[in-house]
């Protein structure tokens, strides 16, 4: 059920519309179902329509007229709320609608339950699926009604009504969504043959620059150097940056002036204070250590996000989702041209899932943000394996994000995570095809494949048949052979790869293992003494009986996230 609330200046005009034929003769039987005292005159149920309508208007305006004599009447004194059920909902009775109307006027502050001085109001029904509530916003004590945030309070009440009356549960927002383009903006984009409005293009640009920047100053500099973008920076008298606004070059209004957008008008998290807070919290720490492969860093940080969502606090989880959204924004900059449309589509869809009422503590996501910044500063990999590895991990994050938002009743965000899955799945399949085929061509001799098969049956008996008989088996044997040649223990890598996340719901576990082992084997191989210690540790663990293992805490249950990709 949805509510639409507006205000006006004429009680008589609204009543005339509610009891009239409608704009398309859709008002078939207008009649009163409820009122402030239950005794209001009903023009729809009388022989003298005109006189009764005037009487109803006079009754509704009684407090308004008294307030006018004291000079206290508001100019827009008419409050109009329409309530509409979904087409699939069962038909409610007049008594049902009357109860719902009383709940809404009470929840919004028009006529609170706890006092006799509420506003005068009526509820008119002239169609099976909706009613209109009309009120004058002057209370019995001649003070103005306290109905701030009436849309939100009405919406919360209707959410409860849907549950209690067995109506369709609508997807509701939490006021953290980016503002939608207006109809005028959409028509302008169509006239200029753009697939996106200026607002949407600017929002994508700003989000991408945030992913690349390490400081507020660098963020503004990147914007200023972006082709096709005009930037204005506002400063305090001290010279410190106060805010910014941007425009698409050539996008002008009727006066020929640029159409400017501040960061906040693009999205709630794109104001300069929010951007500064995010960048300051994730500023890379100085280090003298050699920089590892940024793609492997990004993939490793991404693979850990589902665990953070399962076990971390909400503020940390929200930070990881925001950082993951920035990573998706940045991918088109380094991806092959054929993949960019799919990646753009996935990033645009997931953008809504990066914001909720949960306040993010961005320092928790420093690892992924720094890795993505380093990725943008490195040449794009030639073979595509690094991108495929990252997308493989990213698909699982989308599923985990959907699950996390559903648990917290973030309906819009859950839908956004779900909508991002199909285009990202397409991008993954295209990115993975060539590197998997190249690995398969390097498959080891049959004898080595048989040894790997025996190893998989020993380490992963529950998934062995599915792995060995899949089309990805030959690629997996190639990376296992490479890892062994580099000095790694294949059994240990298989255990690590399987332990990072369950394989039970993976559509192609061989491919999952291929990417994980590929990444894990990039680390330096342990020396023989370390491998011997690992072997002793593994043997000791296998000798512990199940009750002892449970008691010692070495066995832990991992929450499952349904995995539908690959």
Image: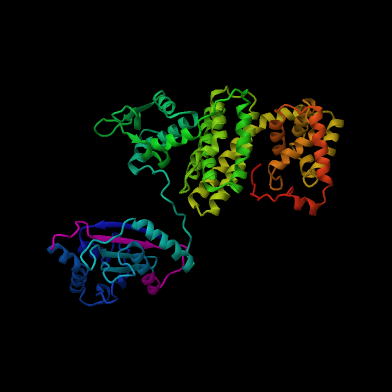
Q: Position of 34 compared to 395: left or right? A: left
As rendered, which of 268 and 27 lies closer to the eye? 268
Q: Quadrant of residue 275?
A: top left
Residue 304 lies, in percent from the top left, at 62, 40
Residue 516 lies, in percent from the top left, at 69, 35
- The residue segment tinted magenta is 70-99
Residue 325 magenta-drawn?
no
Residue drawn at x 22%, y 77% is 47
Residue 479 lies, in percent from the top left, at 75, 30
Residue at the limit of the structure toward the front, as seen here:
552
Residue 86 magenta-drawn?
yes
As rendered, which of 109 and 348 lies closer to the eye? 109
Residue drawn at x 74%, y 37% is 471
Residue drawn at x 81%, y 40% is 538
Residue 192 visible, this angle: yes
Q: Position of 280 compared to 110: left or right? A: right
């Amino acid at each position: 059920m949805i509510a639409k609330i507006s205000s006006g200046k004429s009680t008589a005009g609204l009543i005339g519309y509610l009891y009239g034929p409608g704009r398309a003769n859709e008002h078939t039987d207008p009649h009163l179902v409820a009122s402030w005292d239950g005794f209001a005159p009903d023009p729809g149920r009388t022989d003298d329509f005109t006189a009764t309508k005037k009487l109803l208007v006079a009754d509704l305006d009684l407090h308004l007229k008294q307030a006018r004599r004291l000079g206290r009447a508001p100019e827009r004194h008419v409050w109009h709320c329409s309530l509409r059920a979904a087409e699939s909902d069962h038909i409610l009775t007049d008594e049902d609608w009357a109860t719902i109307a009383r709940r809404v006027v009470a929840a919004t502050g028009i006529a609170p339950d706890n006092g006799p001085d509420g506003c005068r109001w009526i509820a008119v029904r002239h169609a099976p699926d909706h009613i209109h509530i009309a009120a004058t916003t002057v209370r019995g004590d001649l003070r103005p009604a306290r109905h701030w945030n009436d849309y939100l309070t009405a919406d919360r009440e209707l959410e409860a009504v849907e549950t209690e009356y067995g109506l369709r549960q609508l997807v509701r927002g939490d006021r953290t969504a980016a503002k939608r383009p207006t109809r005028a903006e959409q028509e302008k984009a169509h006239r200029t043959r753009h697939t996106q409005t200026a607002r949407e293009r600017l929002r994508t640009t700003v989000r991408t620059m945030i992913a690349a920047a390490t400081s507020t100053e660098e963020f503004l500099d990147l914007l200023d150097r972006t082709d096709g973008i005009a930037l204005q920076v506002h400063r305090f008298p001290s010279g410190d940056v106060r805010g910014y606004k941007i425009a698409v070059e050539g996008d002008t209004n009727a006066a020929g002036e640029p159409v400017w957008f501040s960061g906040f008008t693009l999205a709630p998290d794109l104001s300069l204070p929010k951007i500064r807070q995010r960048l300051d919290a994730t500023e890379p720490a100085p280090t003298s250590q050699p920089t590892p492969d940024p793609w492997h860093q990004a993939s490793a940080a991404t693979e850990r996000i589902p665990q953070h969502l399962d076990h971390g606090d909400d503020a940390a989880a929200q930070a990881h989702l925001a950082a993951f959204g920035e990573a998706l924004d940045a991918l088109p900059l380094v991806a092959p041209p054929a993949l960019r449309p799919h990646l753009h589509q996935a990033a645009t869809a997931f953008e809504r899932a990066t914001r909720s009422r949960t306040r993010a503590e961005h320092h928790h996501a420093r690892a992924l943000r720094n890795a993505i910044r380093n990725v943008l500063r490195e040449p794009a990999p030639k073979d595509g394996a690094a991108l495929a590895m990252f997308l493989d991990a990213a698909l699982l994050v989308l599923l985990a994000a959907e699950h996390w938002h559903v648990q917290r009743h973030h309906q819009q965000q859950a839908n956004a995570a779900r909508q991002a899955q199909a285009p990202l799945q397409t991008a993954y399949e295209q990115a993975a095809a060539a590197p998997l085929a190249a690995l398969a061509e390097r498959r080891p001799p049959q004898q080595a494949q048989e040894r790997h098969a025996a190893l998989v049956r020993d380490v992963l008996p529950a998934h062995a048949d599915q792995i060995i008989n899949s089309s990805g088996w030959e690629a997996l044997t190639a990376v296992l052979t490479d890892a062994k040649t580099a000095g790694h223990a294949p059994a240990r890598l298989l255990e690590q790869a399987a332990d990072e996340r369950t394989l039970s719901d993976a559509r192609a576990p061989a491919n999952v293992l291929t990417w994980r082992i590929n990444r894990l084997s990039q680390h330096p191989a342990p020396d023989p003494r370390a491998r011997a210690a690992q072997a002793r540790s593994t043997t000791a663990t296998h000798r512990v009986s199940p009750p002892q293992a449970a008691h010692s805490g070495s066995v832990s249950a991992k929450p499952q996230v349904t995995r539908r990709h690959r």
